[in-house]
Image (spheres, helix red, strand yellow):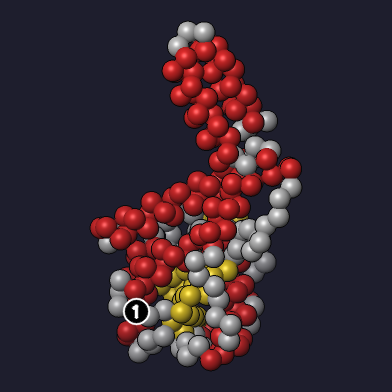
């Protein structure tokens, strides 16, 4: 099954090229080795673990001084049935929302949901999230929505405008752990001083070795692609403010 079959095909190609062009065969072999490593959980856990460990939740959130929780979106699906309506959150934003609800119970501060409708067939995320928050017992007057943003830069820009209008200055920023570095950078660029509260972790804090982690897996490749995308997008934000 993919991606293992691709590794085998690339190895077969390298072997065939060995008699024709050894230099080209070596290039294919090196590329195969890199691709194989990126497809292993052993490498994926190391890379993703490094990214997720950059920020850790505050030990005592009660004394953090946060006056609002900013919940960043991460995808929604439209026109699918849900418990109390139509439209549902994807897995990562659902994890983020669950964390935000628990924090709101502790802090009793408003939740600002940031996230618009990215595509015509995707869900209106802030609206769906607001509906779910209400069904989980969060009071309507504790829910703020920002419905225009379609990326992290806009999350920060439009959220900052609402926070200033509401005279809120100490946001507790909730997003997936792998996304927190870029999210913090964007909010700081808006002259805000957020408190990072990463959630939706994907790997263990101290992963242990097991021989099955050397097996090529599509899930491992996806984790490594996510890490590379976050690094690239962070560089673009640092260089161009986008």
Name the residue: 54% across, 18% down.
Answer: 14
**Seen from this angle, which residue lies furthest top?**
20
Q: Quadrant of the N terminus?
A: top right
What residue did someone put label 1 on?
A: 192
Q: Where is residue 153, by image quadrant?
A: bottom left
**238 sits to left or right of 62:** left
Question: In the figure, 136 relative to 17: above or below?
Answer: below
Return the x and y of residue 24 as percentages of the image width and height: 44, 18
Q: Residues within 10 Å of mark 1 (few under 14, many from 20)?
A: some
Q: Position of residue 134 (x, y in %)?
A: 59, 78
Query: In the picture shown, does residue 223 fall above or below 137?
Result: above
- Give the residue displayed 67% in from the left and 57% down from the top: 207
Q: In the picture provided, is 141 more to the left or to the right than 215?
A: left
Say whether residue 65 is visible.
Answer: yes
Relative depth, front residue between 229 and 45: 45
Identified at 58% across, 35% down, the residue is 36
Which percent across, then down, holds residue 70? 46, 76
Left or right of residue 142, residue 149 in this image: left
């Amino acid at each position: 099954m993919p991606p293992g079959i691709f590794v085998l095909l690339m190895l077969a190609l390298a072997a065939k090229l060995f008699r024709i062009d050894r230099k080209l065969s070596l290039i294919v072999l090196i590329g195969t080795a890199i691709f194989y490593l990126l497809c292993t959980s052993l490498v994926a856990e190391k890379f993703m673990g490094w990214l997720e460990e950059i920020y850790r939740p505050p030990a005592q959130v009660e004394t953090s001084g946060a006056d609002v929780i900013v919940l960043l979106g991460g995808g929604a699906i439209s026109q699918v049935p849900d418990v109390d309506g139509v439209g549902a959150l994807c897995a990562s934003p659902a994890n983020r929302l669950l964390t935000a609800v628990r924090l709101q119970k502790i802090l009793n501060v408003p939740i600002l949901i940031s996230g618009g409708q990215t595509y015509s067939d995707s869900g209106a995320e802030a609206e769906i999230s607001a509906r779910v928050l209400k069904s989980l017992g969060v009071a309507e007057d504790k829910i703020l929505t920002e419905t225009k943003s379609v990326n992290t830069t806009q999350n920060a820009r439009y959220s900052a405008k609402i926070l200033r209008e509401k005279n809120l200055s100490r946001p507790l920023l909730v997003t997936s752990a792998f996304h927190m570095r870029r999210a913090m950078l964007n909010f700081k660029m808006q002259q805000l001083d957020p408190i990072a509260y990463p959630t939706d972790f994907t790997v263990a804090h101290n992963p242990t070795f097991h021989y099955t982690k050397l097996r090529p897996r599509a899930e491992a490749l996806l984790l490594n692609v996510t890490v590379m995308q976050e690094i690239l997008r962070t560089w673009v934000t640092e260089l161009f403010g986008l």
